[in-house]
Amino acid sequence: MLLRTFAICLFLAATASAAVDYTTQIKPLLQQHCVKCHGATTQKSQLRLDTAAATRTGGKRGAALPDLLIQVISGTHDEIPQMPYKRGPLDSSQIALVRQWIAEGAKAPADEQPSDDRHWAFIAPVKAPLPPNGPTHPIDAFIHARLAKAGLKPSPPASPATLIRRLHLDLTGLPPTPAEVAAFIKNPASSIKDPASSIKNLAASLLASKHYGERWARWWLDQARYGDSNGYSIDAPRSMWPYRDYVVNALNRDMPFDQFTIEQIAGDMLPKASRDQLIATGFHRNTQINQEGGIDKEQFRIESVFDRVATTGTVWLGLGIGCAQCHDHKFDPISQREYYQFFAFLNNQDEPTLPVPNPGQDLVKLKAEHQLLLKQIDAHIKERMAVLQEWETTLGEKSKKLLPADALKSIAKAAAKRSAADQRILFKAMTGTADSIFNPLYDRHLELDNILTNGTTTLVMKELPKPRKTTLFIKGDFTRPSEEVQPGVLKVMHALPENTKSDRLALAQWLIDRRNPLTARVLVNRVWQQYFGRGIVETENDFGTMGRLPTHPELLDWLAVDFMEHGWSLKHLHQLIVGSQTYLQSSAQFSVLSAQTAATPRSEHLALLRSREANTEHLLRNAQSTDPNNYLLWRQNRLRLDAEVVRDVCLATSGLLSLKMGGAPVYPPIPEGVMSLGQVKRAWPVSKGQDRYRRGLYTFIFRATPPPSLSVFDAPDGFSTCTRRIRSNTPLQALTLLNDAAYVEFAQALAARLIKEAQTDDARITHAFQLCVSRPPSDSERQSMTRLLHAERDSKATEAQCWQALARVMLNLDETITRE
């Protein structure tokens, strides 16, 4: 308790010691919460708060400074209710910040101009000049200037071994090999004195790797709510993987993000649209499809459009447009009418299936599998023939007319003349869906039947020749249509160009218009989030008035404008971020000497580290007390790897990883019984050969019953767009790495690799650490592993079993599944 009290006192003292900056801390706060009612266009109670001078002047109740402002935002005024009125109060830290600013004299620039009444995110970004007298790298210039205001300094760079592992994991999702680590450390340019000079070439080579597209495709597929099944309760499989491969290939080619956007929103509307551009429209076919019997198909078509509107708003604009489905948005300037105008853009499409050539398929093998499944299904039907016959006798003429056309044709035949195909059709007609009567091999039969009939297919969008009528829905209820609306964009932002046809292509072009204040900001913020665990705007899916203010607004705008100036190149943005000192910092919160010494050859690096140890310790402890959550980025952040990367790292470490790219999803081993957890039991034909060991990106994802080893590490389910994965820490994760059948297999393979590639216990232990965490073990770690081996040998385990035990420990290390 005493220690905690002391820490709080340190934090308060450190916070109080740093002067509050009006321009970067107070004015954005007032702009976000107060200026809408007390600005240039509206002055309730004749009060303006868009400049410090106007705040001092005050309104009907006199000057707002020094006391009135604090009283109303803290809710202590005798007559005025707590402000902001009916919008949720400021949190305690924000109120404390305003209180400190006032106590320090409410200082503000003498030449301050009134701000735009619009929320900051609706004002186009401007590329501000870099802070003077700072680093030349633009990111470091802004970050270091902000640190200096808080009395902080950046952390030293991480060790070369840490940096190469960090780069490999962030850019390709795969760890470096021991040989790559050794070569990087020996390179004079990777010296801890000047690591940035070697990062540029390493980053360029990794960005050129085909595995870059695989790593960053998963980031985009989360936002696209990608899955390999239809969702809802039946959750039947679908063929969507050509869209996944499109994303991988587009990222590897560094397709400009504006073109990437246009192709996914409206690729089918481009002149002479290519097959890839048609496949790209699968972005909005990733919605769920309800296959239950007796549903209102129009209701679920509308539900899909609702999802597309919400997803478009979240992914490109960082706004909760979906909140205006039932009523005007409570906080952001989006009316319900505007919502349905936006809805109209996405309400005029057909939803066809596109055949996609796949020359890699073994048709002979697939036909044989198909015939085997047909025999099993027909045997299943034969056992239940009495059920079919009883159902048929209950059908009247009216009931028969309601049957599908193929069922009418089959039932018209005499029972003795019906083929096996007829019986399958009738069973499906009887149950509404064959899934409830056939066994789970049936899914695979449908998949193979589709492939053999149509080839590989994928779901795409196609504009209707005649637009649908779009109306407002009263309270968002599709059964209560109101007035008709035409396609239109949000009034708070830029308008469509004059004489532009208001269709889906126009919407796509509006999203990436240089005048759009949001798209570039939202995109660079989400990329930043991947590298630091938190965006410059922490609420990455809400840039609206209830979202968090950017911690570094000038940097966010600089990056957004620079991104557009460089042709919307994602690879340029990646190169810019990873080349900064901010990215290259150590993630250590206290002394970094021991960890870096263990990972660095005993050369001039050791002397350098020792010479600065005392100063580093002091700086880190000061930063930890002043900015404990690292919002100012005085160090890097340790990040638990994404679910698929956890699998990929263990596959690569064990030597089992298949580097095969693209194609149909695969079925690695999963625990027994998983596919029985949904409403319909699904087949899981465990893949053989190299398909068993492919990257997590290629694992088949049933939305209702995803692979547990991915879910336990917080992989999204694909039901809706995911713009930020959570990073939980649960015992189930450790149990998965220790006991899941796939990870036991990885440990066995790693053990065999250690026995094969090194000859002594010490050499094998060193090799295990180099493979798993890209560094040699410390003395204490080596001793612990040696004790483990001796204990296993004393228990009469075989040599292979001894090393399997050690391998299971290595794959379960926090450091193995963490990006430092």
Image: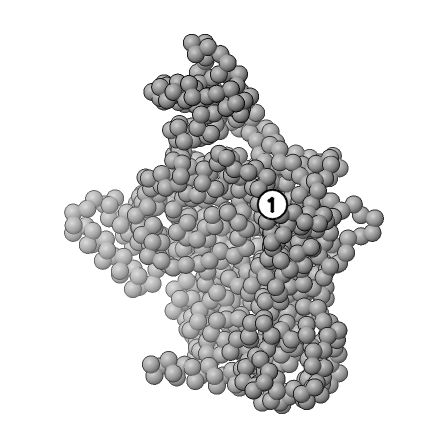
Residue type (three-letter) at the residue carrying disc 1: Thr
Task: Locate residue 265 relative to residue 811 in the image: left or right.
Answer: right
Residue 787 position by quadrant? bottom left
Q: Residue at x 46, y 53 (%)?
A: 642
Residue 256 x %, y %? 68, 49
Task: Locate residue 89 relative to residue 265 in the image: left or right.
Answer: left
Q: In this rendering, is residue 341 above or below 537?
A: above
Does the image show residue 374? no
Give the camera-side residue of 755 and 539: 539
Q: Residue at x 53, y 63 (%)?
A: 534
Query: Residue lying farthest right?
Result: 499
Does the image show residue 504? yes
Give the camera-side residue of 687 and 97: 97
Residue 429 x %, y %? 47, 25
Quadrant position of the C terminus in the picture: bottom left
- Label 1: how many residues lie within 10 Å, few (<14), some (14-19) or many (20+)? few
Q: Residue at x 49, y 56 (%)?
A: 725
Q: Residue at x 16, y 47 (%)?
A: 796
Residue 583 x %, y %? 54, 64
**Residue that badge 1 annotates:** 479
Task: Locate residue 527 relative to residue 334 in the image: left or right.
Answer: left
Render colour scheme: one colour
Quadrant position of the N terminus in the picture: bottom left
Q: Secondary structure at mark 1?
A: loop
